[in-house]
Amino acid sequence: MSMVEAASSRSGTKAAREPDRQRGIDRVIAVLEALQRHHAPMRAGEIARSIGAPRSTCYEIVNRLLEAEILEPAGAEGQVYFGRASYLFGRAYAENNALHRRVGGVLESLAAQTGAMAQFCALRGNKYLVLESRSGSGLFRITVDVGVEVPLPWTASGRLLLSHLDAQEIRDFIPPEDFVLPTGEQLSVDQFLAEVEAAAREGYSVTRNLVDIFATCLAVPILRQDGSVAGTLCLVVPAELVAEQRRELLDLLIPAARQLSAH
Amino acid sequence: MSMVEAASSRSGTKAAREPDRQRGIDRVIAVLEALQRHHAPMRAGEIARSIGAPRSTCYEIVNRLLEAEILEPAGAEGQVYFGRASYLFGRAYAENNALHRRVGGVLESLAAQTGAMAQFCALRGNKYLVLESRSGSGLFRITVDVGVEVPLPWTASGRLLLSHLDAQEIRDFIPPEDFVLPTGEQLSVDQFLAEVEAAAREGYSVTRNLVDIFATCLAVPILRQDGSVAGTLCLVVPAELVAEQRRELLDLLIPAARQLSAH
DNA sequence: TGATAATGTCCGATATTTCAGACAATATGA
DNA sequence: TCATATTGTCTGAAATATCGGACATTATCA
């Protein structure tokens, strides 16, 4: 229920107009999520359009959030974006969350040892999300901005993050358009399901040339105490890998993820 | 106690009239600020007490914020703290804010060059706040957690952050109890005002043994285009400094702050 | 240049939300 | 053991914040 609601509020630009009038707190959350999705400063009017709220309401809310420094002016023409208070809330989260705290160091050492981009990823709604990343030493870098949502079928991690669902649930969970890769190619649902199953069996997932032309992505799950997947560690390398290189990287990645998993 | 805490919640704003009923959005903000001040997970009931809100209202709001992942469960006994969404909002701020982005690198190089703790600080309400810090190489480290509010008279930066106020305004601005140093010693208001004036004249401020027994703190202002103080850069060293050492550190600090100031 | 579309602010009515208090279920302590 | 305090959940009703729309300004563009 809440999942569906949250998912639709995140993905749906023009969600069905359910009640005539929405709760204030929901509007506040919608404003913040809209800004995060847009990933750049917006004007109050734009935000109102994007969340389907009356302009007057949106101005009211934005102004109050500005006062609290949760938002701040950003840009010369009345745009707003996240403010200092938001920053401090985020720091507080990172400091307090044991997993997150440990992830930083692990990513750093992975990036240093492999020269690749190392990332910590998780599920959010029905999308994949990079929560933390460290770039390797390589000249060419493959980056996904932290906080940007990406369709699950586009990523190696996506094959690991669905282990709590069965085949039918996965079909229902992922919107059909997400099976169209950024290259324009259509990924077959059956193939994806097979890959999800294989990933669960093997305990890792490797994909090639999915998002970018020349990139291999290796992902392994970080597990909670109950065995469910809390997130993934993943390495992105701008190259084909021979079997031996692949093994080497997995031999670094798997212990790293085990170290982060609840014992 | 709860009233005191609630009233002090952001000093200056519209503290005056408290109607028996508060806006939902204000309650949301109060909840988030209470958690940030407390700097640790809290239960819904505790939060209610700390912000002076009815318990039922507080539960309602906390539950909605949990759904949005702005808060998340933290601790075995129903405590909550900032969640993943808060983290992403904070990252978004840090990525978008030009000053903040540049500060990271500058602090790093200051910490590396001096071996001291380097911090980026600003004014928030009538308190001093560390927004970013990098620790030096030294064995003994002097740290203030990011996001913790500290009375202005306790810090070197505090002498620089008040340049927009005149003497009388400063007297009104800073609560009397803030002139009691953590050592228990009472700082005279006149002396503080003299130091503020000196800091403005010199363009830097150095304090000794204010917060901790063996620490010298050097701070210089980062200026906005209009000449007002946007924040400070500061170095904390666990030692007395002879004039020459002091000069050396200032010669690193001052250009660093100029580099960050709007040209 | 005039016509059209946005922007930011303000207002009154009413649908929604806050609040107080009751409640059962636990925790705490004498 | 009983008495007392605390927790999390619900409820109805009063109070207010949301909403639609109007209003001047300011952009945009034919």
Image (cartoon, coloured by chain):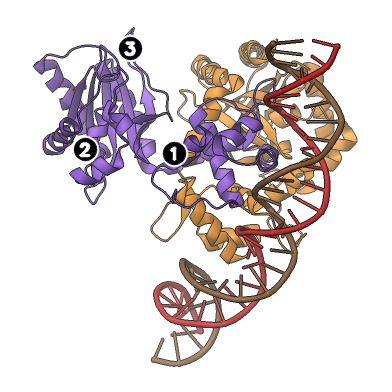
Chain colours: A orange, B purple, C brown, D red
Q: In this view, does A194 lie above or below B173?
A: above
| Vertical comparison of B3 with B238: above or below | below
Q: Residue at x 43, y 30 (%)?
A: B147
Q: What element carries label 2?
A: helix
Tag 3 subunit = B
> Amino acid type of disc 3?
Ser
- Of the two numbered discs 1 and 2 on the same chain, state the one appearing first in sequence: 1
Which corner quadrant of the image does residue A201 belong to? top right
Q: Which of D21 and B34 is in front in this view?
A: B34
Residue A213 seen in the current view: no
| First in sequence: mark 3 vs mark 1 | 1
- Residue farthest right in this picture: A168
Which residue occupies 54% across, 63% down?
A: A45
From the viewer's perspective, is the residue at label 1 or at label 2 nearer? 1
- Which residue bears the numbered disc 3? B137
Q: Distance between the residues labelled 1 and 2?
A: 34 Å
Query: Mark 3–mark 2 contact, CB under 8 Å?
Result: no
User: Residue B43, how many percent across, how many down?
Assistant: 64, 28
Residue closer to the observer: A245 or A170: A170
The image's mark for residue B8 is 1
Q: Do labels 3 and 2 share a chain?
A: yes
User: Residue A180's spot in the image, x, y percent?
Assistant: 73, 45
- Relative to B240, is B212 on the left or the right? right
Instruction: Identify the image quadrant of residue B148.
Output: top left
Q: In terms of depth relative to the viewer, which is nearer, B59 or A2? A: B59
**Which of pointers 3 and 2 lies earlier in the amino acid sequence?**
3
Label 2 Cα crowd, 10 Å radius (few <14 / some 14-19 / many 20+): some
Residue type for callout 1? Ser
Marks 3 and 1 sit apart, C-alpha to C-alpha, by 37 Å
Residue tagged by mark 2?
A: B258
Q: How far apart are marks 3 and 2 (CA)?
A: 24 Å
- Dot 1: element: helix
